[in-house]
Image: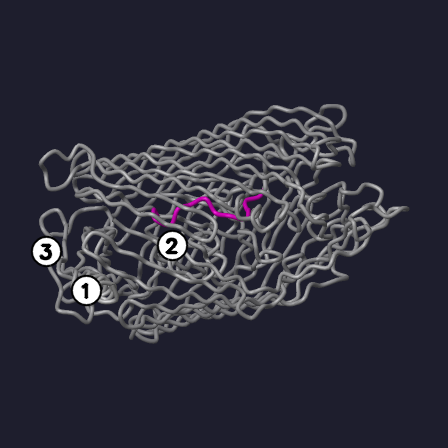
Amino acid sequence: MKNRFLLILTFISITIQAQVFGELTGYVKDEMGTPLFGASVYLENTQIGITTNEDGFFILKGIEPDSYNLTASYLGFQPQTKFNIIVKSKGNQQYNFFLTVASEKLQEIVITNRKISRPKETPLSTQTLSANEIATYPGGNNDVVNVAQSLPGVSPSVGGFRNDLIIRGGAPNETVYYLDGMEIPNINHFSTQGSSGGPVGMLNVAFIDDVTLSSSSFGAQYDNPLSGVLQFKQRKGNNRKFNGNFRLGASETALTLEGPLFKNNAKESKTSFIVSARRSYLKFLFELIGLPIRPDYWDYQYKIAHKVDDYNEISVLGIGSVDDFSIEAPKEYDEEQQATLEQVPIIEQQTNTMGVSWKRRFKDGSGFFQTTLSTNSLTNQFTRYQDNETKSNVYFSNNSKETETKFRFQYTKFLSNWKFSTGVNTQYSNYSNSTIDVRSNIDYNTKINFYKYGYFANTTTSFFDDKLDFSFGFRLDADTFTKNNSRSANFSPRMSLSYNLNEVWKLNASSGIYYKILPYTSLGFRDASNNLINKDADYTQSIHYVVGIERILDPASSITFEGFYKKYDKYPISVLDGISLANKGAGFEVLGNEEIETIGKGRTFGTELLYQQKLTNNFYGIFSYTFFYSEFTGFPTSKYVPSVWDSRHLISLTGGYKLKKNWELSSRFRFSGKTPYVPINKEETLNSYPNIVLDYSRLGEFKLKTFNQLDVRIDKKWNLKKYAIDLYIEFQNLLTHNAPQPPEYGLERNDKGEQVTPKNLVEIKTDNGKLIPSIGFVIDF
């Protein structure tokens, strides 16, 4: 028996350790999408390389599974490197290169050490993460938006458990999101309507090619950003063979399938698909450990890409979710869980976004245009009860639905050393809402619909032998609903400059004026006389000034230092609370569903240091430090008050090391300084409990303790003939530091959980400074 057992173990070991190889495929094209025949593609520090065929396609075979840097080069073009490519025996995604033309002096032989580069339109305040970096991010739980919170200048949410993108002291709703050029208003489960954050991201990392965050110098094609643009680039499904991916994580399970359609006997199909479904099991996990909340969600995602001919391509994509947040009374009394049971809202949400995009490349190779038609919807039922267990005595209810139908056309033309881009976008919005707010004596029904439209243009070129890059663009936006918002009133110019002092030093600068329309929750709000009292609201304005210097240390590392100043005007102020809405939107609430006045001001300014090291000698890492001030006015509008994001100090350090035999160790450390918070009004809260009433007049009097969190992740990969397995273990909050949160209160009760008479508020003792271990695995087949 013992010998038989040893024989089985030996067989398993031999099977796992048997030599297997992977392969990489992809295309090399120019900026217009024209295939580059004969381009060189090779894995750095290996002898593996090949040239592309007439379609620009390449396939590298016989690769030992490991991590590599993949480089593509072509005569007269700037080389491009994709870092930290993880080659597996199964499930390798396609890697596509789009090379830019080199300067005239480099037309014969291209030699450059600038592998870390940024677009000329956005030469600073921009960071990009690859799919591999996101998938192995420590503490990220395969959540794309959660990972983006670790990028430079992004503050962690209060308590560190939400996906709010708070960029350089701006509010959470100041960022817009684009998926393959299609705007997505909502990217989180249980999202805050009127804002954009939530506890869990909706995007499946298996779809992602890369993610780019721009915190200034936004392209003219993006409307409504005030602090940031987060762009998600999706990959196409495999057009040669079927693949699959199964992931089991700490809170969810996901299945992704991809492959060719209508392939017949051809080597590759003109049509490919990738589709996924995810299911949360947090509901069952929380029930098992006795927590009162029951978050439950599904989401789905898909993309179909079809190559009509050599010059036309059509893509169909979509994403959606079904969310249900309910509660269940715990079996045993616990004061913290009892307070949570009484105070949390009951949320039911459904979202859906889908679109079709047509891209046509000009036959003369001089440019292309892209047309996108999309629609999205959000249904939100947000309810607060006096008694959550019986769902009785509603004191706040928001039952709303918002839908948008969008059309976007962008035309790009290359003439000599100039790049011109122009386009239009239109949007039809339909919003309905039924709100009951007992505290504020509000009870109304509303329904509005209107058109929003814009025109944009941008030009980019280089001067002085490509030493000076110049970009100028503008937007004109207006709508048919709000008053006093003509296109001229919302003229939005932006300009950026980048000057190469020499091969390793670079100066960057940008400035721009940006506008954002108010959320539907504000536009559709009605007073007691059924009047749309926010109809005369202005667009919120943000003016950015950024300067920076960049030093290229070696082909894979750089250091940048930037100074930034953001000036806000016409910011909405709550008439009820007398506070800028910039201080709201990062909680479970409905933002903007109240009377507002767009007369507020604000300013955020500071400096940012960033060091970036792409994969070199098995190590990669990013370090950033941001020092800033963030303050906004309420009533009175002449007095600036530190915002609830004014932590002054942000530190982010993420790195990883590739060990032998496909082991990897990575870690993430985040730090945030003391942040102001709004205390509760105890007297009013006691009278209206479980409704929590905040005292905004005391903002700035109290600060939370500093936030710091260290997460560590260990990955081990096995590559079999038919499967590739990644097993990972994560340790979140390894330093067991308490996440800072404002004091929480509940009704005083005895040991049996019975309410004490007369009723009284007591502070709830919380302990969230615990080490959180988790384990998960990914199987590619």
Q: Is residue 548 magenta?
A: no
Q: Which label's residue is closer to the chain start, 1 or 3?
A: 1
Q: Does 577 appear above or below 737?
A: above
Q: Residues within 10 Å of mark 1 (few under 14, many from 20)?
A: few
Tell me the distance, in whole angstroms, between the alpha carbons under discs 1 and 3.
Answer: 40 Å
Residue 699, given in percent of the width and then of the height, sits at 75, 56
Residue 450, given in percent of the width and then of the height, sits at 54, 26
**Residue pointed to by mark 3:** 38
Magenta residue span: 195-207
Tell me how many marks there are.
3
Q: Residue at x 46, y 38 (%)?
A: 298
Q: Nearer the viewer, mark 1 or mark 2?
A: 1
**Residue pointed to by mark 1:** 14
Q: Is residue 357 left or right of residue 630?
A: left
**Residue pointed to by mark 2:** 121
- Type of residue at label 2? Glu
Q: In which quadrant of the rendered image does the N terminus lie?
A: bottom left
* SS for callout 2: loop
Q: Does 350 appear above or below 168?
A: above
Quarter residue 60 falls in: bottom left
- Type of residue at label 1? Ile
Q: Which label's residue is closer to the chain start, 3 or 2?
A: 3
Tell me the distance, in whole angstroms, between the alpha carbons under discs 1 and 2.
Answer: 53 Å
